[in-house]
Image (spheres, rainbow, N blue to C red):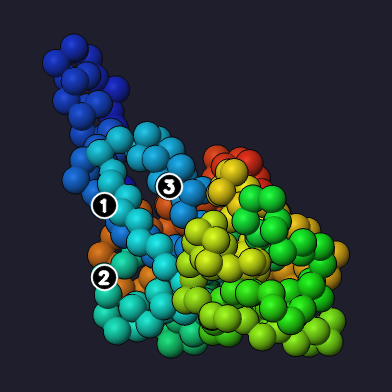
Amino acid sequence: MTKRCLLPVSAAALLVAVTACAPAAPNPGQQITVFAAASLKASFTQIATAYEVEHPGTTVTLNFAGSSDLVTQITEGAPADVFASADTANMSKLTGSDLAEQPVDFATNTLTIAVPPGNPAGIASFPDLARPGVKTVVCAPQVPCGAATTTLETKTGVTLSPVSEESSVTDVLGKVSSGEADAGLVYVTDVRSAGTSVEGVPFPEATEAVNRYPIAALAGSKNPSLANSFAQFVAGSAGQKILRAAGFGAP
């Protein structure tokens, strides 16, 4: 039977009617855990704060790492509600195993060359990364930034001989900012968020390997409505404003 709200005839009746017909108040103890690619750390920290402000009482816990490492954690049963990947390939591993709902693309990103302040090795182009004596650091092939690097090597015919392959783009950035490497391939957004600790050297070939970022609620979420709400927030106007300011491209 359809519930109807009758017009009350007294103040007391009005209070009863409004209480009966009003939607349930949000649970102040709601919380979700978001697994996100390392390159999203700065922007997702801002997005989570904005989401909590818009949804009082909600707590968003963030876990950042390389996308492939996060997929491994999720498939091994790590508790998580949302996954934001730096590429579609790693997201597909979860959707193909029915561990994630239908993803939505929310951003794009491209690689750039990060060098220490002053660019002591004189890196000016992508081929310069293959020069003898240049200590270049890249992401491991299974990580999205590493897969993009491999694509660029194929497209350009330039074969790199990196001194190390890191498990996340932030690790590559750390090697460069500490002076352990002459150059590293990271995302445009990483150089922007790093401030003065590194300098960026753009190169035109980067457009040959654009990474698309998808986000999805996970099938094992204990709070699927909140997980979907956060994913929609990221893809919506508030999340997009933060992502654009960080240097991410439109999806």
Disc 3 versus disc 2: nearer the observer: 3
The disc labelled 2 sits on which kind of residue?
Pro
The disc labelled 1 sits on which kind of residue?
Gln
Callout 1: SS: strand
Q: Which residue is drawn at 28% across and 44% down?
A: 58
Q: Which residue is drawn at 75% across and 87% down?
A: 159
- Residue 213 % position (x, y): 59, 65
Callout 3: SS: helix
Q: Mark 3 points at which residue?
A: 45
Q: In this view, does 152 lie to the left or right of 246?
A: right
Q: How crowded is mark 2: few (under 14 residues within 10 Å), some or many (20 or more)?
A: some
- Residue 191 % position (x, y): 62, 53
Q: Mark 1 points at which residue?
A: 31
Marks 2 and 1, Cα distance to the nearest angstrom?
A: 12 Å
Q: Name the residue under label 2.
A: 79
Q: In this view, does 237 lie above or below 199?
A: above
Q: Is residue 8 above or below residue 152?
A: above
Marks 1 and 3, Cα distance to the nearest angstrom?
A: 15 Å
